[in-house]
Amino acid sequence: MSNLKFKVMAKWYGTQEIEMIWHGEWADPELKVDERVANYWEVEQYCVDCCKDEGINYNDDFIYAEWVRTHEEEIIDWIYEITVAN
């Protein structure tokens, strides 16, 4: 994680463990699990791709948010795979 000022927002899509970090409009947001920090857009694309594979309507915010909450552990595992602990 960079030394930029940031603000931890609410849990991402109502998940239990995934926090969204907002750096302002000029930088990509990040998602944080424990000490692992991943680019928001990489994780979002991973989730959209999974939804496509499962035939889930990811354009419906309610359905997509429910999918994210139900697959939180899988998403966390993926974040661990693509990041290094700080």
Image (cartoon, helix red, strand yellow):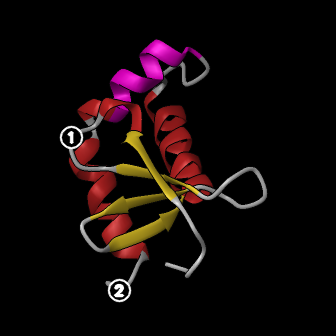
The residue that disc 2 covers is 86
Is residue 81 positioned above or below 67 on the image? below
Query: What is the x, y in percent for residue 78?
Result: 35, 62
For residue 29, what is the image quadrant? bottom right
**Is residue 83 toward the left or the right of residue 42 in the image?**
left
Q: In front here: 25 or 85?
A: 25
Is residue 62 shown in magenta? yes
Q: How many labels, in total? A: 2
Main secondary structure along the magenta-highlighted residues: helix
Q: Amino acid at mark 1?
A: Gln
Secondary structure beneath label 1: loop
**Distance Cα–Cα, label 1 vs label 2:** 21 Å
Q: Amino acid at mark 2?
A: Asn
Is residue 67 positioned above or below 53 on the image? above
- Residue at 55%, 39% in the rendered image: 48
Secondary structure beneath label 2: loop
- Which segment did they paint magenta? 60-68
Q: In front here: 72 or 8?
A: 8
The residue that disc 1 covers is 16
Is residue 49 shown in magenta? no
**Is residue 38 toward the left or the right of residue 70 in the image?**
right
- Residue at 36%, 50% in the rendered image: 19
Q: Quadrant of the C terminus?
A: bottom left
Query: What is the x, y in percent for residue 81?
Result: 35, 74
For residue 80, what is the image quadrant? bottom left
Query: What is the x, y in percent for residue 60?
Result: 56, 14
Query: What is the x, y in percent for residue 45?
Result: 59, 49
